[in-house]
Image (tube, rainbow, N blue to C red):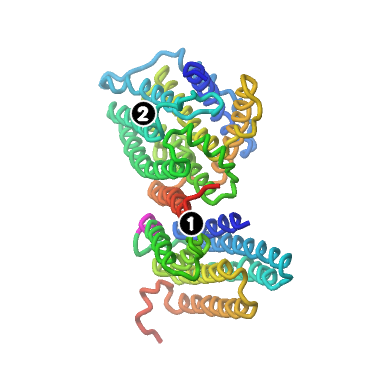
Amino acid sequence: MSSLFDTLSVMILLSSFVLMANKRIKSYIKTFRIQSMLIALAAGILGIQSVMEEGRIDVLVICFIIVVLKVIYIPKLMNKTYSSVEYKVEKDFIWNIPALVLACCALVVFTYFSISTIDGINEGFNNIQIVNSVSVILIGLFFMISRKKAIGQIIGFLVLENGIFITAMFSTNGMPFIVDMGIFIDMLTAVMIMGVMVFQISDKFDTINIDKLNKLKG
Amino acid sequence: MSYIVYIIIQILTMVLIAPLVNGIIIKVKAFSQKRTGPPILQMYFDLYKLIRKSTVVSDVSSWVYKAAPYEVFSTALAAALLVPVSTMITPPDSIPGDFIILVSIFALGRFFMMAAGLDTGSTFGGMGSSREAMISSLAEPSILVCLFTAGLISGSTSLDRMMVFMQGAGTPLIHPVAILLLLALLSIIMMETARIPVDDPSTHLELTMIHEAMLLEYSGRHLALMEYGAAIKQLVFMTLLLNLLIPHDQFIAMAGVGAVLLSLLIYLLKVILLAVLIALIEINTVKFRLFSIPNLAALSFILSFLAFLQYFLLGGSYV
């Protein structure tokens, strides 16, 4: 069973690499949806496991919430924001895409070496799931840095949140229900506010390039 | 089994099956467009026709132009000898030569192909050669890292030893390293054998072609050898993927001639399935811009590098 979780964590990491190599907003949303599906799958398997062994159903409930929120609702919200702004393809990155992808690779190596110095997480060996999920957090953060448009930054934030969620899930076999719910509601609020903000920004400034936001406009 | 039997079976299998793979891919693609398409054996007919036709050689070309088809075909055959179609028939003391030789042999064949493209001095040949040089230099690190990872897992650089180890490991395809290597090899096949995200094999549109542009001046026997060489090279890559990551020989309990035949039959079945899969990938993707190909190559490199990294994350074990 742990091999299955290893594979799922690798696939989640891989989906964030695919996200990094993309430049179309539609593909961002699609890749985020696939990543959320993989996370929901991992949570579902973990949930069934905890129902069978301990009789807890909260992980299963969390899985259901992920499906509703991250696989269905947030991508739909993003698509709505996407159709209200005029640009479809991201054109300006801080570096070119191959360099960005290789930098992400360096992030994974960095995580590997930094996780191996923490005593509590790994029992004598490097926990592959922890390394992969912490890498997803860093890649999400790096995605936010590398993209200059607001929608890319929202997606980066969501990937970062996905990373935090799977780090918590893989290291504790299911967080307390109330903590997960708190994070989800925070994230939902943030995404809704950001969606409205993007719409307002593109309305006021005719662009959502964040470089142009350093001037005040009445 | 002895070397002679190994060589005969290896060459016969590769040479006989290679055009079939192209036929299947073209047929599946035709079905997706609601056409009947050419018969599956069309490439055999084409090759037969081309071999009987006379060849036209440009006056301004040098010996490179005439040597290149033979070079391409013979390097493809040499590569075919290094990748066993079935581990049942490998000689007892392993095949001489390893995957580093395999990659170098392909590089040699590609070098002659690019030189021939430049030799006649036509614009398209030069353009195709420069693009091929770019793509191959991007794909090569990915192949090497991928095969080095497989070698690291199995503790050997020889391809048949690697395959035997993978059979012993049971290779559940759910293993993270196996999945990453599988995806990496699949993307390498798409890049190396002029498939759709990188090059469109069915078009003669000058602006997009890469592989075809280098062969544009060739005719008759020379063209047949070039095409045949490319088909064998494609089958070698597919064999590498199939026998390394989806091994089947451990399920055959028998021994002797029957076991070898059964093994080859299963191999043929796997090749057909992979050909259909490649055709499906081709149907479902669009051709990339030339300048987007580095992105694909970077992803492909990342896949093999992640496999390498995950192998260490798992504590250096592969069970």
Residue A70 horizontal/vertical position (percent) = 60, 68
Q: What's drawn in magenta, residue-wise? A: A96-101
Residue count near mark 2 (Cα–Cα under 10 Å), binned few <14, some 14–19, many ≥20: many
- Which numbered tag is attached to residue A18? 1
Can the viewer see residue B69 in this picture?
yes
Mark 1 and mark 2 in contact? Answer it, CB < 8 Å.
Answer: no
Could you tell me which residue is drawn at 47 percent across and 41 percent down? B154
Q: Chain of mark 1?
A: A
Residue B22 horizontal/vertical position (percent) = 54, 30
User: In the image shown, does B73 or B104 lie closer to the viewer?
Assistant: B104
Q: Which of the 4 quarters of the picture holds residue B221?
A: top left
Vertical arrangement, residue B110 with respect to residue B185, above or below: above
Label 1, label 2: how many angstroms apart (C-alpha)?
A: 32 Å
In the rendered structure, which amino acid carries the disc numbered 2? Gly
Residue B260 horizontal/vertical position (percent) = 60, 23
Q: Which of the 4 quarters of the picture holds residue A204?
A: bottom left
Could you tell me which residue is drawn at 41 percent across and 36 percent down? B157
Q: Is residue B226 left or right of residue B9?
A: left
Residue A202 horizontal/vertical position (percent) = 46, 75
Can the viewer see residue B227 in this picture?
no
User: In the image shown, does B33 or B193 lie closer to the viewer?
Assistant: B193
**Outermost residue, front direction?**
A124
